[in-house]
Structures are given as C-alpha cells and as structure tokens.
Amino acid sequence: MDKETVATISYLSRLAFDKDNEDKITKDLENIIKFVDQLESIDTSNIDPLTSPLEQTAKTRVDEVTAKNRKEKFLQNAPDANEDYFLVPRVVE
Amino acid sequence: MLKAKEISNKELIQETFDLIESNSHLNAFVTLNKENALNKAKAIDNKASDLSLSGIPIAQKDLFVTKNLRTTCGSNMLSNFIPPYSATVIENLENAGCISVGKTNMDEFAMGSSNETSFYGNVQNPWGENLVPGGSSGGSAAAVAAGIVPAATGTDTGGSIRQPASLCGITGIKPTYGRISRWGMIAFASSLDQAGPMARTAEDCAIMMNEMCSHDLKDTTSLNKEIPDFTKNLNTPIKGLKIGIVKEFDLSTLDNEVVKIFEESKKHYESLGVEFVEVSLPNINLSVPTYYVVAPAECSSNLSRFDGVKFGKRCKNPKDLEDLYIRSRSEGFGEEVKRRILIGSYVLSAGFYDAYYKKAQQVRRLIKNDFDNAFSKVDLIMTPTTRGSAFEAGSMNDPIQMYLEDLFTVPANLAGLPGISIPSGYVDNKPLGVQLIGNSLQESQLLNVAHCFQTSSDWHLRTPSSEIR
C-alpha cells in the first residue's frame, strides 16, 4: 500500500482527502490489508465462494407496477430538482 | 398496568418522553417522534385496541427508514433525509400497536463497535460515565438499559446487536439471515445485515420477534419459512441439551474475570441439565479477517448510492458533476465509513479481486462448513459475546483492535446463523454477556435456553444505579 494506490482507490471511491491525512490513511489501510492477508495461509483450492448464507438465486416476480407514481415525493428529498428531474451541474457543453 | 388501566396510554408515552429528557446525557436518541407518538397514544385511549403490543413504546434504530420521520443512519450524509416510506420492520411493529417514540443513535452507517463514529456524538453507557455502550446499535442498547423503553430495534452485521447488548447488560438476538425483512434497512453489507430485537429479557425478545418477522416480497432474501410463535416454547426443560464449546477460541487471552463469568455461566447451564461438549471449528479464527474483506466490499458497493444527486447531502457550489460527487461524499461521510469504502474498493479492484474478495468468500464457505459439522454433534454453541466489558470512550484508537471487538460475534453473521447475547455477570460493576449460537432457524430454541437461564438467575434484572450521572 503506497500513496499512489491510495490515490487510485480514493478516486475509484469518489473520495478526496486532505494532504495532512494521507500518511495516516495509507498506514491504516496498510495495517488492515496486512491483517486480512492472514487469509493467504489457508488452502482454498476447489472451494466454491459463498456469496450469501441463503445460497439461493434472487426470486423473480411478475413485472407489474406495485407502487403508484411517487415522483413528487422522491424529488422532495433531492438537493436540487425541478418538477420532473434531479438537477446536476451542466455535463454537456 | 396498561391493560389494568392503571395508567393511560398517553401517560405512558408522556412518561417515556420524560425519561428520554431526564436521560438526555446518554445521547441515546437522534430524533424524537413526540407529537405523533402522543397522538397515537391518545387515539388508543379514546378507542381501545386489541392489538398484541398496543401502546407499547419502542425505540427504533436510526438505520430503519421511517415515513415522514428523519432518518440519519448516524451520518451527516443523511442529516436532512425524510423518508417517503417505512421499513417493513417498522410497519410490522406499528401494525401490532407499538408506538415508535424516536430514532436511536448509532455508529455511522452501522460501522463501529463503540458508537463513537456517529455524527451525532457518542452515546454514554448507562452503567458508567465515559463508558461506551458498544455499537453499532449503541443508542438502542442504552435506551433499554436505562429503562427508557422496554424494547428497541437493532441491526447486526458483525455483532451490532449482541455486542452492545453485552456491554449494556441487556438481551439481544440476531436472527437467522433472512428471518426479518431488510426492506427499508439502510444497507451496509447486504449478505450479513439482519435486524433483531433488544430488550431486558429473552421473553420480551420473543414477543418482539413474533411481530418483527415476516415473509416480505419486497426483500428477495426474505425467507419463506414458517414463522413459529417464539413465545410458545419458552420454559421447555433443557435437560439433555448439548452445547458446544469452541476448541479454537483461546479464552486464556481474556481477563480472568471474563473467563470466570463464562465458566460460572457454564456451571449454571449444567445445573439445568445441559451437557457441554468440545467442538472444533478449525477456521473460526479467520472470521474477523474474512469479515473485513466481505463487509467493506459490500459497503463500498452499497454506499455508492450516496452521490449528492437524489437525496442526502450535496456540497456547496460544485464546479462540475465529478466535483459534486467527490466533495458531497467526502464532506458527508466520517472517517471510519471512508476507511471501509476504501478497503472495499481495494479488495474489489482489478488485480486484487481474486486474492481478497474471492478468497474471503471461499474462507466464508469453510467457516460455514465448520458450523454445519459442529451442529451435527451439538444443539447450540456457547462463546463469550465480547472480549471484555465496556471500555472508556476514546481508549481504542487502533482500527484493528476495534475490529477484534467482533471476534466472537462475526462468525454467526458469516454463516447466517442466529445468535443471542444474555446478561451473565459483572466485571467491576460493568455488565457482560455470554453468547449462544444456534443452528439455522433455531431462534425458538435459543430464546428458550436464554429464558430458562433468566428464570433461574437475576443478572438481567439488575439496572444501572440512578446515582450514575
């Protein structure tokens, strides 16, 4: 774990950090990754990954509208919206 | 008292808010639901209700969305979020007559074991000034321990119900994964998150479970299994029951007092006719490292929804869309949440996915297999809930030491199994719990064993001295 890697994963995570904080974050992440590196010690060849304790695929249902249009309610929580859309800074010049 | 009409519904709810006020130093609540709660109570006074939990005041963890009532999840990101709908658990409890009095403080997005990561400040453990209540359901645990409410909701991703229950001297159960709907629970790690009740006794937890559980079509991981009456089997004799003790957990590293409580608890169960057997779970000591790959991976994915566009915090004067995303997230999330998102992004990134994420999921399978083998020999497994009693706020600064708080609780989440923490003793006047882990869907058995323990002991009846302030 180095500052360059931290910068890459910070960008992937869409997070930014103060310069003063960089050393601490790098150190913390390094320690955590070192800690989880214990997993290397065990042989897992031919072991199927367990993604969920239920081990069932997602259930499907009939494609029907079950909740009526609540656009107004959901737009109320938006930091910026007009009657129909969420608003963000201009994307296309 | 409510049934005998010795107290009106409105008086009970008013009394609850008086208690919240007189315990405000605990900082257990983030948002109160006072007007609405009092109106509901008045309505029941005017028109009697025969619902099972009619008029009972309940505190709701601030991770469950509540219609028209601010839901923060302990984060600055959601400091202004008013959900347009309620979680299924909230609906189930309110449909049973419960009155939600407020939303309880918690670690930000449930990431923490001491309630110190909340944007809304630390919660104080009612058992001592400056002691943490545990986390992430710290506010719920403190509210029950202080006697403000008889029960509260919690959620448990790696121990967030059981660990605070242990540190606050109350009973808390994490049911089997899928038993209680996750609809309307703000997601942290979707394959691990599970809601459950926190109360003084196992009996009260059983009563709460009866209302909280349901098969929910809105949650694709909701189990479509028969839901028993969890109170029905309470008091079934436990003579002959086999409880496993995990060979690989080296208790000699814990404080003598902690080991003593565990051993005395064992003796107590033996006096009730339980037989203890050593079981081997060879991979169980890899649970915490496995958890700290799986949970951050799922967290980084789940928390990508907080982008400053659709709801939640948005930074001021973004210069473009990218700047809006980055600054909204950087300003909205606290340090621990950011740390976990970064770990998650790292273990999921190209080149590391197989070495970390896939590897952890493979070890997760081995841990689950270990439990399957153990449960072919024993009915339940007993461990301490926590490594020790409540610690001082600010005393645990190393993230890994904090992660190890979950040593005994994360295995049940990884395997999707039910676990309960039962008040079992005191270290320097600070409560401590013992954990029982059951096989899949065996909550009734867990609750019965805990109930048998509680009807023959009084640890769960002790309350923090009113002199502690």
Image (cartoon, rainbow, N blue to C red):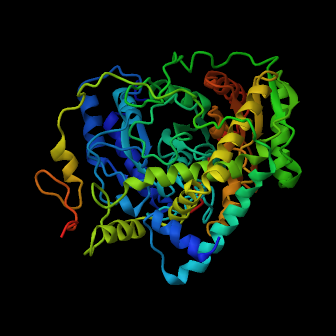
- Where residue B424 appears, as percent x and y from the top left, is 73, 41
Q: Is residue B189 above or below residue A8?
A: above
Direction from residue B44 to residue B428 in the image, left or right: right
Query: Furthest-left residue in view?
Result: A83
Q: Is residue B420 above or below residue B260?
A: above
**Residue B187 makes an appearance in the image:** yes
Query: Which residue lies at the image location 61% right of the left edge and 31% below the top edge?
Result: B202
- Where residue A84 appears, as percent x and y from the top left, is 13, 50
Direction from residue B319 to residue B18 in the image, left or right: right
Quadrant of the rendering where the N terminus of chain A is positioned: bottom right
Q: Is residue B39 above or below residue B277?
A: below
Quarter of the view holding residue B46: top left
Closest to the observer, B418 or A44: A44
Query: Which residue lies at the image location 28% right of the left edge and 25% below the top edge?
Result: A63
Direction from residue B211 to residue B115 in the image, left or right: right
Quadrant of the rendering where the C terminus of chain A is positioned: bottom left
Closest to the observer, B170 or B182: B182
Closest to the observer, B430 or B122: B122
Closest to the observer, B268 or B107: B107
Query: Furthest-bottom residue in view?
Result: A20
- Where residue B104 appears, as percent x and y from the top left, is 44, 51
Quarter of the view holding residue B402: bottom right
**Residue B55 makes an appearance in the image:** no
- Where residue B143 appears, as percent x and y from the top left, is 50, 49
Q: How many marks?
A: 0
Query: Which residue lies at the image location 32% right of the left edge and 39% below the top edge?
Result: B86
